[in-house]
Image (spheres, rainbow, N blue to C red):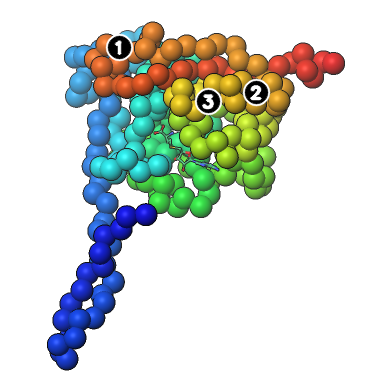
Amino acid sequence: MASLPSQRSKGNSGTVSEVSPVPIPIMKTISRHYFGEEETKNVDIISADGDHRGFYIDIIENIEETYGMFVWPCSIALAEYVWQQRARFSGTTVVELGSGTSLPGFVAAKVGSSIVMTDNSDKLEVLDNIRATCELNKVKCEVMGLTWGKWDAPIFNLNPQIVLGADVFYDNKDFDDLFATVTFLLQQSPGSVFITTYHNRSGHHRINFLILKWGLKCEKLLDVFCFMPSHKAANLHGSIQLAEITLNVQNFLM
Ligand SMILES: C[S@@+](CC[C@H](N)C(=O)[O-])C[C@H]1O[C@@H](n2cnc3c(N)ncnc32)[C@H](O)[C@@H]1O
């Protein structure tokens, strides 16, 4: 693998000695994401009937594309879907898996969901970043370490009506663990649904195979470009699908 040459300096003796490279901190930024009417660009507007007309969410992220510290396109698509389906999210309990910067979770919180945002228990930086973003947006939410396929005590207290996951079909080796956690959560709350957005690179066939394997079924499959507003779609690349997945109750009746 190619690597940068290590930095070298001259010691007092005139010989050249090795010094360890100083780690360069990754630059952070705040990106602003708008939902709803254009004229609501700088304010949070709720109409007289209590319905949101629009708001924005500020997300703290890394400038570089880093796994859980960057707003991935799937997250932008899922957040827009939550906004468009806000009546369905109001008053519901929601858990987001592999939240990363958690844009869909923040939209759910804004439209009235009680939300638990989760990411890998080992990724303390990611979990701290979600907490900081909660404070920045003055949004009430719970942040929890949840590693897929692991059964730590807090997961047994979760009873979500909706489970969200943006770009969580990223690494093939994690798919089975992810489905184990999703199936567990869907079993915790009868009638619940897993709503996920993923790139086609993630392997349709493998996902379909795992849906069957875990006794689930796909209720809805959309190309996200069919619901994204054109100004947001223009910034998305590749083929992104949205799927709504539920327990296949027939498997449990047999
Ligand atoms: C591609 S990023 C997507 C982040 C965010 N949902 C988005 O779309 O912007 C995948 C996320 O899944 C999390 N993740 C990966 N493996 C995981 C595991 N085994 N358990 C829990 N979270 C995991 C990563 O930490 C990361 O935040």
- Given this view, does label 1 or label 2 mark the residue nearer the observer? 2
How far apart in space, not on screen, are marks 1 and 3 (Cα)?
Answer: 26 Å
How far apart in space, not on screen, are marks 1 and 2 (Cα)?
Answer: 32 Å
Q: Which mark is residue 209?
A: 2
Residue 95 position within the rendered picture, expressed as x and y whole percent measured from the top left: 53, 31
**Beta carbon at label 1 within 8 Å of ligand 1:** no
| Circle 1: element type | loop
Q: How many labels does the image show?
A: 3
Side of 171 where 217 appears, left or right:
right
Side of 135 where 249 appears, left or right:
right
| Circle 3: element type | loop
- Given this view, does label 1 or label 3 mark the residue nearer the observer? 3
Residue 94 position within the rendered picture, expressed as x and y whole percent measured from the top left: 53, 28
How far apart in space, not on screen, are marks 3 and 2 (Cα)?
Answer: 10 Å
Q: Which mark is residue 78?
A: none
Residue 169 in sight: yes
| Contact? badges 3 and 2 (CB < 8 Å) | no
Q: What residue type is labelled 1?
A: Pro
Q: What residue type is labelled 3?
A: Gly
Is residue 162 placed above or below 157 in the rendered structure? Answer: above
Q: Residue 229 carries which label?
A: 1
Is residue 253 placed above or below 182 in the rendered structure? Answer: above
Q: Which of marks 3 and 2 is nearer the N terminus?
A: 3
| Circle 2: element type | helix
How many residues crowd around disc 1 within 10 Å: few (fewer than 14), some, or many (20 or more)?
few
Residue 185 in sight: no
Side of 97 where 68 appears, left or right:
left
Query: Hey, which residue is sitting farthest bottom in the picture?
Result: 13
